[in-house]
Image (spheres, helix red, strand yellow):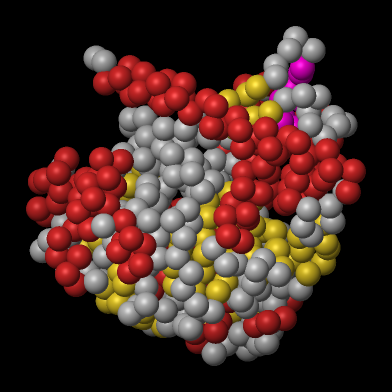
Amino acid sequence: MSAGAGADRLQHSQAVLLGIDIGTSSSKGVLVDATGKIIARASRPHQTSHPHPGWVEHDAESVWWADFLELTRELLPAAQGCEIAGLGVSGIGPVLLPADGNGEPLRPAILYGVDTRATDEIDELTAELGAEEVLRRGGSALSSQAVGPKIRWLAKQEPEVYRRTEMLLMCSSYLVHRLTGRYVLDHHSASQCDPIYDLRARDWSADWAARVAPDLPLPELAWPTEVVGRVGAEAAAETGLPEGLPVTAGTVDAWAEATSVGVRAPGDVMLMYGTTMFFVEVLDEVRPHPALWGTCGAFPDTYTLAAGMATSGAVTDWLRGLVDGDFAQLVSEAASVPAGSRGLLLLPYFAGERTPIFDPSARGVLAGLTLDHGRAELYRAALEGISFGVRHNLEAMGEAGGSAHRLVAVGGGTQGGLWTQIVSDITGKEQQIPAETVGAAYGNALLAGVGTGTAVDPDAWNPVVDTVRPNPDNTERYENYYRHYRDLYDSTTRIAHFLAAEQHAADQTP
């Protein structure tokens, strides 16, 4: 539906909610009524910057703020005559955006775990603070996902930028600051700033913050549903939003997305099919595991286990570009190929890997190629490789004490049905598909609705409309493939690490 469509059906007295999300490769926005019905939606594609191997960045002004302005201006006409009751925002995370005292960015934002520049600092801080103590206090081992090592990298590699830094912002907190002037971060995002947040105390770890981020003022903490400020006059003039509009603290996109599909009770698991694959399981207590991320949940009194693959949809998009095809045609062709892709096996580690192996030097591998294989087999092998990675992560979550009572699928990759079916076949688990899979933007509107007291029956916002069930024949066939998938990484690690080092050396050569 376009931004203007449906506006004429609104009652002038009706309250509406606005949700905006800044993703890795696109930004999305929705305008919804108090019952969760989507009135209008909009999206904008954008690019990530890769200035060096292992570096992944966004420019906050030209990507985050520019997308926010465009989405807001497109959506606002659909709210004509209605009260906009609240605004919720989210974005990729955890990220590191150093800014000065006015909130002006001092360099491009260093993105989440797909950016692997701080490997030396990860090792350094782990040795300095102790691996067991880091895991106990923060809920996660230090990895490329953690913000702390990237702060130390900044201090070492760009000392002039660090010297001028007075704010440590993420995508959501940058938007909140631009809109309200508040320097605030939600508890969930803060809990991914390992090792400077204490998960059980739900507060900054003052002693470790002084060692990892010396002399830097840390933001005030709030929950994602809390109204932390109101749109100021300058932001209202620039965006077209009403001055005084309540703005909630926001959060990392995956947790907003989990909220959007009702993943809020212990044992609920979100599978987010996007540029990267992400998993969130809700817990009622802290369950640290060295191969996963333990974090605060989006709501008070909840915790989560999280996992994330470095690539997923990014691999299929890369492959689509190589074979010059469109997604619909490739999905159709791959669906005609039997389980196992006629003897192909792919490791989807095209940008290293995050959970559960935490290996930034892992590399993609495609085994079994013959002259008889074509693009249909290649595309299905990519989907299967990603899906084997899903199973690997779900097994790690089970080892950590997660129960995975209910799996809910969300994101652009749920469209078409093939990818979700392969995941269910490989894992042997059912997945629920909700009515709306628009994702984090919808969750932001819900968080704003809860925070402002506007949302009517939040639990009924996004009902389940379909269930993907495993095909027993395929599940049985995939068992052998999965065992070999796990073996393939172990048997190629030494070679992959050599090639990763060669790639790094080549990049350093003038």
Q: Which residue is drawn at 50% across and 77% down?
A: 285
> x, y percentage for residue 3?
63, 62
Front one among 373 and 102: 373
Q: What stretch is highlighted in magenta?
A: 373-383
Q: Can residue 352 be seen in this view?
A: yes
425 versus 334 height, above or below:
below
Q: Which residue is drawn at 84% across and 43% down?
A: 476
Front one among 395 and 252: 395
For the stretch drawn in magenta, the main secondary structure is: helix
Does the segment drawn in magenta span residue 41? no
- Can you name the residue that lies furthest to the top here? 371
Q: In which quarter of the image is the C terminus?
A: top left
> x, y percentage for residue 263?
63, 71
Q: Can residue 5 be seen in this view?
A: no
Front one among 220 and 209: 209
Quarter location, residue 464: bottom right
Q: Which residue is drawn at 47% across and 53% down?
A: 291
Question: In the image, 338: left or right of 62?
Answer: right
Does the segment drawn in magenta span residue 379? yes
Q: Which residue is drawn at 48% across and 40% down?
A: 353
> x, y percentage for residue 247?
42, 77
Quarter location, residue 269: bottom right
Quarter location, residue 10: bottom right
> x, y percentage for residue 495?
46, 21
Front one among 502 and 481: 481
Q: Quadrant of the N terminus?
A: bottom right
